[in-house]
Image: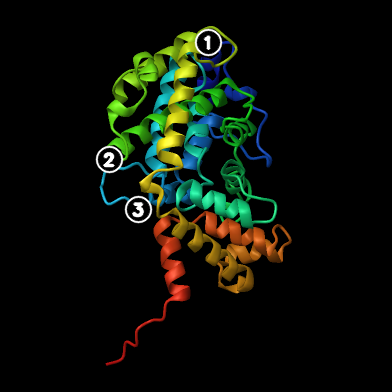
Amino acid sequence: MTIREQLEEREHKILSPFAAYSDESRGRDRYEEACDIRPVYQRDRDRILHSKSFRRMKGKTQVFLAPAGDHYRTRMTHTLEVSQNARTVAKALRLNEDLTEAVALGHDLGHTPFGHAGERELAGICPGGFRHQEQSVRLVECLEKDGQGLNLAWEVRDGIRNHSTSGKPATLEGKIVQICDKIAYVNSDIDDAIRGRVIREEEIPREYTEILGFTLRERLNTLIHDLISSSMDKNDIILSETVRRALSGLRSFMFERVYVNSVAKAEEGKAQYVIRKLYEYYIRHMEQMPEEYIELVHTGRASVERAACDFIAGMTDRYAVMKYENLTMPRMWSVL
């Protein structure tokens, strides 16, 4: 018996009957030999962690565009916070931690530079629209590894595709990530907004803080404990109604004060302009894109417009600005 088989056997002894067992996965799109050490979801977690898309998240905006301080969240730190919260819940409920972590680490791979501002711009100009969760799946299915994709298990891709509020994950592990994503971004965005003096702690409505807590630590503690206690021994992942309403109200407060009308979002128009101009340039000059994106077009796997969206969506904030400057700004004569 291999180490992997021993671990799979252990899952059946330890995990909840509601868990997604590794040896019962619906599998991968392309057959490959199983690892002798790692079960399928652990292997997928490793593939995501070592992907180029994952590394690029360190240079992508979470909420605040190009903040001057060192301590604001990036798309990567947000992802790590989601993963940490989700694993805590999965472990307490005896669900599959490897699947939970794989979904959490992969859920935002498809985010654009400049956060949701970049996503909105690509959604408006790309034929067929643009949704970051679908782009995350596209990355792991056909863009990573020079067009081969990561060949992840069905359950991991399902969780990534359905992590947004409107999604319906097929596994409880996917549902954990869906809720923990919201828990993470609402609370960390409050922390960053306070740090950036966009809001003050005392401005958060007391009808929510009296339920959830008056600090970041208190709110996370309340939400994670409530999620675990409300979901224990159930074939579902839920918050209690009181806590769910408080979190929803807190999210609405953030949309009103930070996500839409905030002074900190004032530069987003410029960021969207950069996205739009890059798109217009690359659909006219396809040959200037990297070879793997040109190959998508030549092999009929993508239109020029789709390939341009794929290339731009993968950029970090800094790289997008650099490419825009290289394409639009004259270079100084360097010969003395």
Q: Amino acid at mark 1?
A: Lys
Residue 2 versus residue 155: which sits nearer the camera? Answer: 155
- Quadrant that contains the N terminus: top right
- Numbered circle sitting on residue 13: 1
Q: Is 213 on the left-hand or right-hand side of 19?
A: left
Dots 2, 1 in contact, CB < 8 A: no
- The secondary structure type at the circle numbered 3 is loop
Quarter of the image for residue 296 reads bottom right
Number of other residues with Cα within 10 Å of mark 1, as a class: few under 14, some 14 to 19, many 20 or more: few
Work out how far the residue at label 2 is from the one at label 3, CA to CA, in angstroms: 15 Å
Tell me which label, 2 or 1, sits earlier in the chain. Answer: 1
**Residue 66, label in figure:** 3
Mark nearest the camera among 2 and 1 is: 2
Mark 1 vs mark 3: give the one in front. Answer: 3
**According to the image, label 2 marks what residue?**
197
| Tag nearer the camera, 2 or 3 | 2
Label 1, label 3: how far apart the Cα atoms are: 48 Å
The kind of residue on which mark 3 rests is Ala
Gap in Å between the C-alphas at discs 2 and 1?
50 Å
